[in-house]
Image: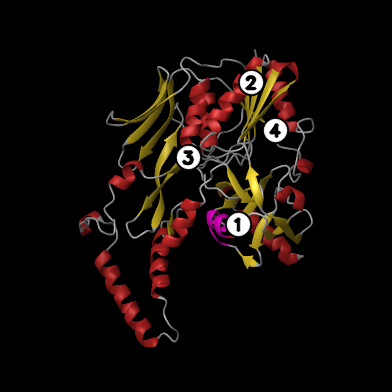
Amino acid sequence: MENKNKFWKGVLVGTLVTAFAGLIIIGMAAGIWVVGNGVIQNQSAQITGGEASPSELSLDIDRIGRKIELMQQIINEEYLFEEDTEQVESGIYMGMMAGLGDPYSVYYTEEDFTELMENSIEGEYCGIGAMISQNRETMMMTVIRVFENTPSAEAGMLPGDVIVAVDGQDVSGMELDLVVGSYIKGEENTDVTVKVYRESTEEYVDLTMTRRPIETPTVEHEMLENQVGYILVTQFEGNTAKQFQEAVEDLESQGMKKMVIDLRNNPGGLLDEAVKMAAYLLPDGTIVRTEYKNGDSDEYFSKDGTIQAVNSAGREFSQYPIEDGHELDIPIVILADGNSASASEVFAGAMRDYDRAVLVGTTTFGKGIVQSVIPFTDGDAIKLTTAHYFTPSGQDLHGKGLEPDVEVELDEELRQKAIVSLEEDNQLQKALEVLEEME
């Protein structure tokens, strides 16, 4: 019992620094995932590219190189076993990224990077139907959502379950996206056994389930009483903004006068989708701004029926249309919690900065940084934190999150239920009370 208590305390130590992979068991939509823009163009470290001068580097490469040569000489002369040079080289790169002290910056081997790209979410996959987050300090993987009528729900998986092994393989300390792609994802009609630690019973449980194609829409909606529209957004994928617009239009056709947007347990995803959703509801103006180390910045804003992205030099680098003139000015409450991160915070922050929504729930996670995936010519890659993002008012949320206008915790007995009905959901009921008071 004492060991189990110590285990759980270890899980909880880093609760406030949880890093979301935002994977509906087999996907990659982690935080705000940016593949390269100007970062890749400016690489000085490509394997076959130009070399940076020593004065431009913060590390003494010559001294480090000499020490590595000395260490290799000692290994050659004294090491008892056979050296795996590929593994040693990968370890050097991994150690360099780990030395940054940034849990979001990592090195991927060629094999890992290939798997990562192959496992990108396409909306349908063979898996188990659960959403998982990973604590970047403890590397513990915790189930935060179990989808109805999926293998995970049928096997009895619950929110709060901590994944410790898959098919007998200890996955502690592994990157979540690789665990999902290499162990949990698999061929249709094949079995997978996931071992979890369950706090409520202080025991380890083996859950065996059969993989099958899973279709998980990221947006669900329904009309509640008193002409209140309810929209749940589970994460931001490639078609989330389109699904959201369709949900709004359907609710408007039913006479919606007020709206609740539920972003609880939404780990984020694609920045563009959050920007499109906000632009669909808000008047023209800035939605989010990102700022890089060298002082450059990118600004995403809506204007004249388009969403535009412009860098600090005034060069427009992307543009896509939105429904011209659409703007929704009705009372809106956004539900959020400590698992609402990244793109969720971009959307909620913009809505509140424009005084278009009241935030109800608990303080959001506070992930206000952008990662860029930078591939190298030999097939491997690094994921590196490259920018901060700011709300329209200039608020930097990283490490702080968005504090709710009305704070309310989810009732304790509901936190580990796989399915919580709208009627028993005390946070939602509070949101409806707040809406009643809004004009």
Mark 1 or mark 2, which is nearer the start of the sequence?
A: 1
Residue beneath the point at 66% across and 57% down: 163
Residue beneath the point at 38% across and 69% down: 89
Q: Disc 1 to disc 3, how far (Cα)?
A: 33 Å
Residue type for callout 1: Gly
On screen, residue 41 versus residue 305, left or right, reads left
Whether pointer 2 and pointer 3 mark residues with C-beta atoms closer than 8 Å, the reply is no
Mark 1 or mark 4, which is nearer the start of the sequence?
A: 1
Mark 3 or mark 2, which is nearer the start of the sequence?
A: 2
Report the magenta residues as a range: 173-182
- Residue density around tag 3, few if under 14, some if 14–19, many if 20 or more, within 10 Å: many
Q: Disc 2 to disc 1, how far (Cα)?
A: 36 Å
Q: Which disc, if any, is residue 334?
A: none
Residue 223 sits above or below residue 160 on the image:
above
| Pointer 3 residue | 368
Residue beneath the point at 58% across and 28% down: 244
Residue type for callout 2: Asp
Q: Secondary structure at mark 1?
A: loop
Residue type for callout 3: Gly
Kindly indicate the quadrant of the structure image that contains residue 436.
Answer: top right
